[in-house]
Image (cartoon, coloured by chain):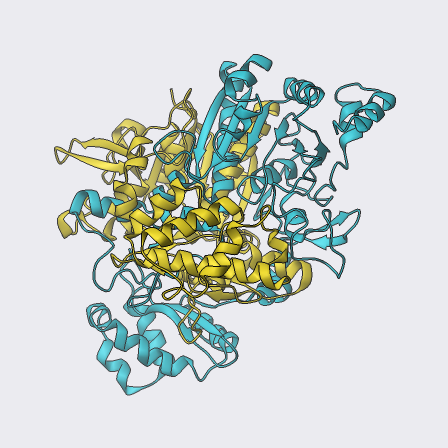
Chain colours: A yellow, B cyan
Amino acid sequence: MSVLNGIRVIEIANERIAFAGKLLADMGADVILVEPSEGDPSRNYPPFLEDKPGPDRSLYFWHYHTSKRGITLDLDDEDDRNRFLELVVSADVLLESEPIRRLSLLGIDYADLREANPGLLHVAVTPYGRDEPLSDLPTTDLTLMAAGGPPWSCGYDDHSLPPVRGWGNQGYNTACHYAVMSFFTALMHRQATGEGQFIDVSITAALNVTTERASFCWLVDQSTVQRQTGRHAAVQPTDDAQVLCADGCYVNTGVPPRFPHEYARMLAWLSELKLDATDFPELVFIEMGANLDGPIDRTLVGVDDTITAIFSAARQALALVASKMSAYDYFIACQDAGLVAGIIYSPEEAFEDEHFKARGLHVPLHHDDLDMTVTYPGAPFNLPKSPWCISKRAPHLGEHNHEVLGS
Amino acid sequence: MSAALANFRICDFTGQLAGAGATKWLTAFGAEVIRIEDPVREGRWDIMRGGPPFVDERRGINLGGSFNNHNTDKLGITLNLRTGKGKEILTEIIKHSDAVTENFSAGVLEKWGFGYEQLQKIKSDIVYVSNCGFGHVGPYSQYKTWGPLVQAVSGLTFSSSLPGEPPAGWGFSYMDHTGAYYMVIAILAALYHRQRTGEGQWVDLSCTDAAVTLNGPALLDWTVNDRPMRRENSPNSNRSQFARMAPHGIYPCTGNDDWIAIACRDDADWQKLAAAIDAAWTNDYTTLQSRLDRQDKLDAEISSWTEKQDKFLLQNTLRSQNIPVAALQKPQERIDWDPTTNNFGLWPTVEHPEMGNVRVDGLPVHMSKTDWEMNRGGPCLGEHTEEVLINLLGMTTKEVQTLREENVI
């Protein structure tokens, strides 16, 4: 049985919170997606099955609404609103991202709902928080990310190129992670006391505290990080970390090694690749690294000239080695030698890697409506005693009206 | 103190951000987190300990700014697990704990004699959550990672790029943050399961698994339509991947490295933007299809308009027209000047015995009954050793003194 079996969630359809609903649904909650009669706009988002648009063909919608049931209700209609109220009374959680005053104007905000359902956990996810009028301005994942901070740290050494927003509505995803963390925290309080509560999640606040050094450098010493290609934004520029390999793919060479035996391994590699001091004049520093008495003290990099030269030569040697191999071969050879490195996979290449297959990331799901089996990405983490599970495909519009609402 | 998690005690070995970020959430909601560090290496397994940034010119193991940021309100004790007595004390702490948490490389805790089987013998319903790059099972389980490599191997670095350029990736450890978020969920979900069934369990959380799943729609495009993201002119992550929107990008403004994000969701947004631009070229783009078909040219035209304007003034102008827009904010702008983060209470000040008062990352949520609190900074090395051994394990001051003399703590 999945961990949230027995928990019922009412989700008022909105692309900003769909992922939170999916996480709860895949953990076993009975998530009822409430759409307007015309359907949620994200039913029309590409990509589509076979590239043909249609309300039940959006792969975006498929992904974000697995394991949910779907109903249609017009919250502006009094009869439908009463049905909605009845549903919320039967539920543990209301998950919504409505304009900040809409539900109170309709008489179905937390102040109204808690009377009928004192144990209700009402999770509101809004751009700037429930008390902030800016939350009602139009936004997209892109504008929320720009305001919230992550893109400042992402992009290229060349600052004539724009900062980069990470792919795939990760701004919404981050807010949804916080919504789910908050839900579980409030659930624990309810377990102990029976009390429900109102939870106010701000998307831009979530992004502000998902920027690592950019925030805490400013908070601690008022320094400002600057974006760099393929590596951490930093106050002082750092060395390249990305190398183009012989097969046209990139690797991240990670942090240069610290231990003499790692330098010895690097020497052997250079020799195997027939690279000597004519190709690589800094070879002498690698030899010095191999002859060190103990590991390099990283705090001396940039302070002690010899240590700095050894460290810098190591980075150059790794880049040279990487440029002579395929990205995958370099990744495996480094890791087998105990050196930390990573191949820069595209998402589909990652998905096809045997490691992720072995960990159960390929999850087949039969779509009864199309009589086809679709492979979905599996659990972000799994509870062995109460497993994660995609229990059903995304619902068609109003598919469960009769089942959930009766007539 | 927040009451939400006040009934829980965590025996915590986490460090860096991927682990420490998770237990930071738990303390903010009232859990007692006992952070266990090695006295011999002065807790330096966590590279944040004693590392930059610093509040002033002082340096030292207790003065790391990022460590302070990620470890607010935790109790910090030192315990030498190379010694038999150190192991005995840890065993006693585990008996009094609800969960054991760590983000070491796979197998480290087991080598010390505290793998899941042993933990179960100490406390049969213990919740154990490990968070490591590739997980404890699978072909790469012995491989090492840190945030940027998790992002590289999972596809998240590749996908965050502009066409014709190398991968830009994430200029920070997005997956250290996000790995910590999943770790919070895993800990609380397992504790909830234990409440309902009495069963503990081991959650083998792998940061790269979690990262791969964040590519959801692209993976379905691959498994269903056979369309890879590695193809010509792909990806351009500043464009809209899903809803069909154009323009949709980050454009230059006056000032030093100032930028603005603008998105037009539909023709109505575009008509308002075109009116604000007020130039003949906008007539070439009246339909969504025309804007999507010539998006490079459209972006260039828009850039030539935005680059003469101040980002905040332009933001105000376009906001008044109800067009999705945001100045791309620098750290100082969003932390010191943005009233929305300050009104939300996002940057609380905590008190640290050596660093003084320091602002830290707060939490982006508020709860009406059991809201979070942050008061103390990250613990100094061994700051609460005596307090925990006396109050939790019932030792005497003299016993603690002996342990100190024997280099156990």
Residue B282 quadrant: bottom left
Rendered residue at 26%/72% (across/down): B295
Rendered residue at 57%/22% (across/down): B114
Number of residue marks: 0
Q: Position of residue B306 (x, y in %)?
A: 41, 80
Taking the view exactly as shown, the residue that stands out farthest to the bottom is B280
| Residue A106 makes an appearance in the image | no
Q: Please tell me which residue lies in front, A162 or B400.
A: B400
Taking the image as shown, residue B11 lies to the left or right of residue B384, namely left
Rendered residue at 51%/16% (across/down): B117
Taking the image as shown, residue B350 lies to the left or right of residue B145, namely right
Q: Position of residue B264 (x, y in %)?
A: 33, 67
Q: Please tell me which residue lies in front, B219 or A266.
A: A266
Residue A270 quadrant: bottom left
Q: Please tell me which residue lies in front, A166 or B367.
A: A166
Residue A247 quadrant: bottom left
| Residue B102 makes an appearance in the image | yes
Quadrant of the snapshot with the C terminus of chain A: top left
